[in-house]
Amino acid sequence: MNRVMLITGASRGIGAATARLAARQGYDLLLSYRQQAATAEALVAEIVAAGGNAHAVQADVDSEADVLRLFAELDARYGRLDALVNNAGMLERQMRLEQMDVARWQRVLNTNVIGTFLCCREAIGRMSSRRGGHGGAIVNVSSMAARLGSPGEYIDYAAAKGAVDSLTLGLAREVAGDGIRVNAIRPGLIDTDIHAAGGEPGRIERLKGSVPLQRGGTPDEVAEAILWLASEQSSYCTGTFIDVSGGR
Ligand code: NAP
């Protein structure tokens, strides 16, 4: 029986790269997205054409009802879960904190923090050896923003990723006895659409000089770290963070 991985926000960027690598490693996949159905379905078709097994589900991680529907789809399709990758995340246009309103903070916290919480909760219910599950691995996609704070750009997003780091640490300790490992990666400047969403498509070009490796990273480079933390090769790691940031 193949191992089953659920990846949130897998239509593009880091999530899509993780899906491609996971499929090559033999995982059966459930991929979620928020809006871009055509992109997600094209990725599924690509994986299936290469001999893999993947399905895409529209589900907004901000919505408890959508997350419950996503996990019901997982139960119906596969009946098991070995690895959850909490990758869905977003940021809004760059601005200083004094320009931000409450609604923006709520949107950013909802997707990046509440969404991660909801998916962790549903995964643990299925993986926990205390509840008849066979254990599993959760990988949260945080950000170097949690460490750097993103001044002048998006302190709200940095604070949300800081919460993801604390959630990762606490949950790792809480469910270690349930056979579940919980780890996180902190990507640095990775070449995806997220920088355009912040209003600066050329952000990596502007900042790459501040990266010791002198370049941005690729989604594939991040996917390698995610797949390692999801695999048995990292069996003695829990509550661990891998910074995939070129030394930044
Ligand atoms: P991206 O290219 O903008 O892709 C974001 C993905 O998340 C898309 O698949 C999107 O779905 C999905 N998504 C967004 N909001 C969602 C929601 N509410 N519910 C469900 N899915 C949602 O971003 P990325 O750069 O690959 O980012 C992936 C993760 O890495 C995020 O957690 C991000 O914070 C983190 N990260 C990225 C960088 C970087 O430099 N790129 C650095 C540090 C951390 P649609 O396609 O349907 O919109």
Image (spheres, helix red, strand yellow):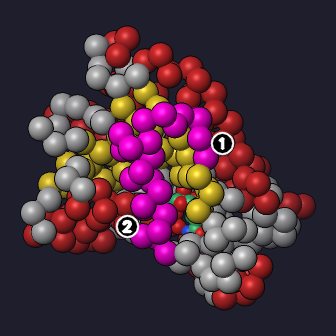
For the residue labelled by badge 1, is the local secondary structure a helix, a strand or a loop? helix
Disc ID at residue 165: 1
Name the amino acid, label 2. Ala
Horizontal side of residue 7 vs 169, given as left or right: left
Q: Amino acid at mark 1?
A: Asp
Residue span colored magenta: 218-241
Q: How many marks?
A: 2
Q: Residue 214 in the image: state x and y as whole percent.
A: 68, 83
Give the residue drawn at x 52%, y 37%.
237
In reply to whether residue 115 is colored magenta, the answer given is: no
Report the Cα–Cα distance between label 2 and label 1: 22 Å
- Mark 2–mark 1 CB contact (< 8 Å): no
Q: Is residue 237 on the magenta stretch? A: yes
Q: Which of the numbered marks, if any, corresponds to residue 17? A: 2
Residue 42 position in % (x across, y down):
22, 71
Query: What label sits on residue 133 in the rendered view?
Result: none
Position of residue 109 measured from the top left corner of the image (x, y, whole percent): 65, 46
